[in-house]
Image (cartoon, grey):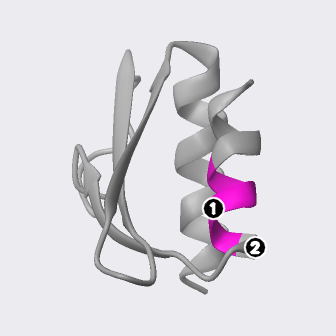
Amino acid sequence: MAAIDELKALIDKGCKVAKVQPAMFASDAEVNIVIVTVVCPGGSHVVVKAYRDDARQLREFVRSLQL
């Protein structure tokens, strides 16, 4: 499953994005990895990782959630 699909599924279950690494306000320079920590109801934490092209797409998706 692609990272963005995994994150969408978690959000549909009521989970919230808790942390994005590297930070979203950091430079838009190319990143090779994006790590998103998600907190779900019940307190469980899930880490979603994306690499290269998927990292760019995941970063843009998370950015769109915050608008």
Q: Amino acid at mark 1?
A: Leu
Comparing 27 with 58, the one in front is 58
Work out whether residue 17 can be spotted.
yes
Comparing 41 with 12, the one in front is 41
Task: Give the quadrant of residue 1.
Answer: top right
Work out whether residue 31 can be spotted.
no
- Look at 63% across and 61% down and name the residue there: 10
From which residue to which does the magenta span run?
7-11
Task: Give the quadrant of residue 57.
Answer: top right
In three-dimensional space, the C-alpha distance between marks 2 and 1, rounded to whole angstroms, equals 5 Å
Give how far across and how far down residue 44 sits, in percent. Answer: 32, 66
Give how far across and how far down residue 43 sits, in percent. Answer: 28, 78
Q: Which residue is mark 2?
A: 12
Comparing 49 with 56, the one in front is 49
**Are the two marked residues, 2 and 1, in contact with CB atoms closer than 8 angstroms?**
yes
Above/below status of 66 relative to 64: below
Residue 10 marker? 1
Element class at badge 1: helix
Q: Main secondary structure of the magenta part?
A: helix
